[in-house]
Amino acid sequence: MNVSLRNLKLINVIVKEGSVTKASKKLFLSQPALSHQLKKLEEEIGLKVFNRLNKKLVLTDVGQVLYSNSEKMLASMSLLNAELDEIKKGRKKKIRLTTECYTCYHWLPRVVQEFRKDNPGIHVSIDIEATKAPHQYLLEGKIDLAIVSSTVNNPSIHYENLITDEMVLIVSKDNVLSGSEKINLTDLSDQNLILYDIPEEKNYVLTRILNNNIGFVGSIQKVQLTEAIIELVSANLGVSVMAKWAVEPFLNNKNLEIIPFDSKLGKRDWYVASLNEISKTENSFINEIKKDFKD
């Protein structure tokens, strides 16, 4: 027994039009052709779909089941086609994304809120679990976009420049380095560097600032939370390196100051990674990120 979507549409139109004659016009078929298809369906399933009463077609119990399901399935197909059409036009209803840096979640929710004001029908899903392996999640089709500061050599992944932010040294105003206009890695030789407690290969400061050379600093201490790092630095128990935007909210209420690096070392480029061409909807979201950082 094999009832096709075409069969369901046939039954649906006959019921709604009220006769085979009207249904045949709706389906652009001749009346004999439509009658033949209906007869063939009943023969294939071995059940009657309509009772013929005084030239009228009345649904049997089987017909009621088929008609009821036709309403659901045709509605689902209509929604599917509409969604595919929106995607074809570059308008998506859902954006699944992640970022490879946990600190980005300080600003990402704010960007999502602003984006939703002008795009209330778009659902933005942030996958925090994918942070540990954004490229892998992207290649597995689990997310649509990944906001990353590192790239991989894979021809399937497309990268688009997003923003450039600045990594700065955070020190207590009581620290010996306080008041410095610029900082060099050699200035950290006697400092306790407080970093996020994440895998070393994912730690931007270790891999890109120190270039995996811990000899530049006196010691390293790992802490999980931004707030805890801020408190330790404020108490002059160490220094840290963070994105300037991440630490600025704490400067007014804490015994802190920030010092830029004396070279391009602190500049960090961010990219949007995707597998497919970025849609209009996704591009609008990306522009919201750029706007947020300009402001």
Image: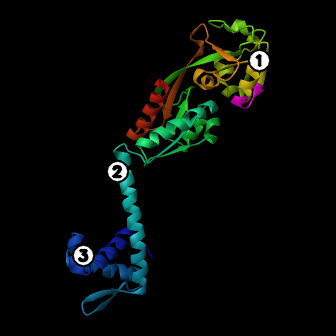
- Answer whether residue 157 is visible to the viewer in this image: no
The residue at the point 41 percent across, 76 percent down is 68
Q: Position of residue 77 (x, y in %)?
A: 39, 62
Which sits in the foreground, 152 or 262? 262
Mark 2 and 3 residues: CB-CB less than 8 Å, in contact? no
Whichever of labels 3 and 1 marks the residue nearer the N terminus, that label is 3
Which structural element holds mark 2? helix
| Mark 2 Cα shell of 10 Å, populated few (<14), some (14-19), many (≥20) | few
User: Of the residues tagged 2 and 1, which is closer to the observer?
Assistant: 1
Q: Which residue is mark 3?
A: 23
- Looking at the rendered structure, the kind of residue marked 1 is Gly
Corner quadrant of residue 244: top right
Q: Quadrant of the N terminus?
A: bottom left
Name the residue tied to disc 1.
238
Q: Residues within 10 Å of mark 3 (few under 14, many from 20)?
A: many
Q: Amino acid at mark 3?
A: Ala
Sequence order check, earlier mark of 2 and 3: 3
Q: Secondary structure at mark 1?
A: loop
Mark 1 or mark 2, which is nearer the start of the sequence? Answer: 2
Q: Which residue is mark 2?
A: 85
Horizontal side, residue 231 vs residue 25: left or right: right
- Give the CA separation, mark 3 to mark 1: 80 Å
Q: Residue 135, how many percent across, how many down? A: 57, 35
**Which numbered marker is on residue 258?**
none
Judged from this view, the residue extending furthest toward the front is: 253
Picture coordinates of residue 45, whole percent (x, y): 42, 80
Colour theme: rainbow
Question: Disc 3 or disc 1, which is closer to the eye?
Answer: 1
Magenta-colored span:
222-227
Mark 3 residue element: helix
Residue 183 belongs to magenta span = no
Q: Please state which amino acid type lies under the numbered disc 2.
A: Asp
